[in-house]
Amino acid sequence: MTEPVRRLHLPQKLRNLELFLLLIACFINASAVVLVQLGALGELDPTLVLLGAGLSALVIGLHIVLRFVARDADPFILPIATVLNGIGIAMIYRIDIADKQGGWESAAVRQTVWSALAIFSAIVVLLVIRNHRVLFRYTYIAGLVGVLLLFLPLVPGLGKEVSGARVWISFGNFGTFQPGEIAKIALAVFFAGYLVRNRDSLSMVGKKILGARFPRFRDLGPILVVWALSMSVIIFQRDLGTALLYFGLFLVMLYLATGRLSWVILGMGLFLGGALIASQTLNYVNGRFTNWLDALNPAVYDAKGGSFQLVQGLFGLAKGGLLGTGWGQGRPEITPVPQSDYIIASLGEELGLAGIFAILALYLLFVARGFRIGFAGQDDFGKLLAVGLAFVVALQCFIVIGGVTRVIPLTGLTTPFLAAGGSSLVANWIIAALLLRLSDTVRNQPRLVV
Amino acid sequence: MNVSELTLLVLRIGFLLLLWMFIFGIVYALRSDLFGQRVRKMKTDAAAFPASAVPAAVPVTVPAAADAFTAPVARASPNPDAQAGMATAQNTTRLVITSGPKAGTEFPLGTETITIGRSSDSSLVIRDDYTSTHHARLMLWNDEWMLQDLDSTNGTFLAGSRVTVPTKIPLNATVKIGATSFELRR
C-alpha cells in the first residue's frame, strides 16, 4: 500500500521555483558586493566575497529545510527576503569602506553574522512550530511576553539609551539588542488570538452615528489599553516610531476582525490627539515636528539635533537621480547613521530612483504575499496573524521610508531586512518563517470535509 | 586593476536591470494569482467538441491521444445538452456534492490537484467506512480534469462504471466515492 501513497506526492513545483528564484537572488547579492568593490576600491577583494557566499549558503540551507518540513510554503517569500538582506549587507559593506573600517570587526561582517543567527532562528521556528494553531493556545502568554519585552529597556542597568531613545538592552560588551522588535511578533500573535476570541462584542453592538456603527463605551477597554501602552512608549522610551507601529498594528487587526471602520476612525483620532499633545509637551517630539515641517530652514538645519541629517539624506537622494551614482561611487557616508536608519537614502543615492522603486516593489510583493496567505486561510486566527505580520512589515517600511523622504516626521525604526541591526533582522526573518509556515498549512488544509 | 568609467556605467545599469528582471520574474510567476486564470480564446467550429457526445468515461491510454480531446467547448451554447463536453480548466469552476451527508455543498476549483480520501491531508476529506485513506484524485492533464483511482479498496465510480485508469470527467457526470457523490460543474 505504500506505493500509491508515495505517488501522491507530486514533484515539488513550488520548491523548485523557489530554488530558481533563490539562485537569481544569490547572484544579485554577489554582484552587489562585487560592484561595491569595483566602485569603491577599484579592485576585487576576494576575502570579503565570502560575505555574499555566507548568506547564500544559509538561505539555501533554509530552502532545504523547507523541502522537508513545509513543502507547500509560498515560494516567493524566501527569495525576496534574501535579496533585501543581501542588498543591505552590500550597502553596509560599502559604508564600511568609506569609513575605513575593515576586517572582521566591521559592521558588514557583524550584519552577516546576525543574518546567520536570524536565518537560523527562522529554521528553528519552522521546525518547532509545525502548525500555526499552536500559537493560538499561547495567546495571553504571547501578550504578556510582548509587553514585558517592550518595557524591558526601562529596567535600570539593563536598558541603554542611544540618541535619546531608550529602546535597547545591552549585554555588557557583547552587544545590544532591541527587544521591541521581537515584541511586535508576540503582540501580533496576541492581537490575533484575542480578537478571534472576543470580536463579537466588539463588532455586533453599538449605536449608529452618521452611518457608522460606533462601539459601546464599555467595549472601548482594549483600544484604550493599547493606546495607553503606545503613549507610554512615547513618553518613557521616547520613541514615536515604535508607538505608531504597535498602535497601527492593533488598529488594522481590529478593523480586519470586526470589519468596522468606526474603530479605525476612533483609533486614528486617539493617536493623532495623543501625538499632538506629545508634540506640544515633549521636547523631542516637538523637535521632530519642527525638523519635518521646516527642514530646509538654515536655522533648523544648523541647530543641535536639527534637520541636518534629514536634509543630508534628501541631498543624497537628489544626487542619485534616476539611475544613481552606482555602487561605491556616491558619498552616502556624509549622512549620519547611513547604514541603519538612513540606508534607504544611501541606496537611493547609489542606485537611484530605479533602485529605490525596485526595493519598494520587493517590499510590496512581500507584503502582498502575506495578505494573500491570510486571504487564502480558512481559520480566522491564521488569517488575522498572516495579515497582521505582513502589515507590520508594511507599516514599518512606511514609517521609516516616509520619515527619510519627509512624508511624515522622522522616527527611528529599522528598514526591514535592509538596515544594520541584529534584532530587526532576527524579528523579520522570524516573520518570514511564520508566513512560510502559515502558507504551508493553508495549502495543506482540506477544502471540504464530508 | 583599474576599472574604466564606461565599464562601471554598464555594470551599474546591468545591476538595475537584473534587479528589475528578478521582480518581473516573480510577478510573472504569480500572474495567475494577480490577474486570475487566463481565459483561452475558444476555437470555433472545427475544434468544437461534437455536440452528440454523450457524457461517458473516455479512458486515456497514451498521452498523445489526449490531444484529440483538448478541444474546448463553446461556452455560450444555449442548449445544456449540446455543451455537455469534458470538464476542462476553462469550463469548470466548482465541485458540487450531490449526495451523501453534505449534499448541496460546493467549493471552487482552481488549477491545483484535488486529492480525495479519509486522511486529513486530502483536499476533499470523506470520512465514511467505504473510503480509503488516499482514495482518488482529480488533476489537470492538458487542461482537462482527470479522475484517477489510487488503488482504493471499494473503487471510484464515474457515471456508474468503475474507474481503473486515469479518466476524463464529463461535465455534470456523477463521480461516486463511498456514500458520497459529486459533479464538476461550470
Image (cartoon, coloured by chain):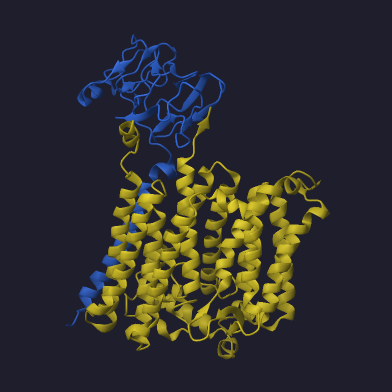
Chain colours: A yellow, B blue
Please state the horizontal and vertical placement of residue B168, each as a whole percent of the image.
Answer: 33, 21
Please state the horizontal and vertical placement of residue A180, each as a whole percent of the image.
Answer: 58, 70
**With respect to residue A361, does B130 lie above or below?**
above
Which of these two is toward me, A400 or A54? Answer: A54
The quarter of the picture where residue B12 lies is bottom left
Q: Residue at x 44, y 13 (%)?
A: B80
Please state the horizontal and vertical placement of residue A68, each as a whole percent of the image.
Answer: 36, 50
- Res B17 seen here: no
**With respect to residue B175, does A356 lie above or below?**
below
Q: Residue at x 56, y 23 (%)?
A: B102
Which of these two is toward me, B10 or A60? Answer: A60
- Res B32 seen here: yes
Q: Name, please, the residue furthest toward the left.
A: B1
Is A34 left, or right, of A358 in this rendering? left
Q: Quadrant of the N terminus of chain A?
A: top left
Is A232 left, or right, of B9 in this rendering? right
Which of these two is toward me, A364 or A225? Answer: A225
**Figure label count:** 0
**With respect to residue A91, does A80 lie above or below?**
above
Is A17 left, or right, of A336 in this rendering? left
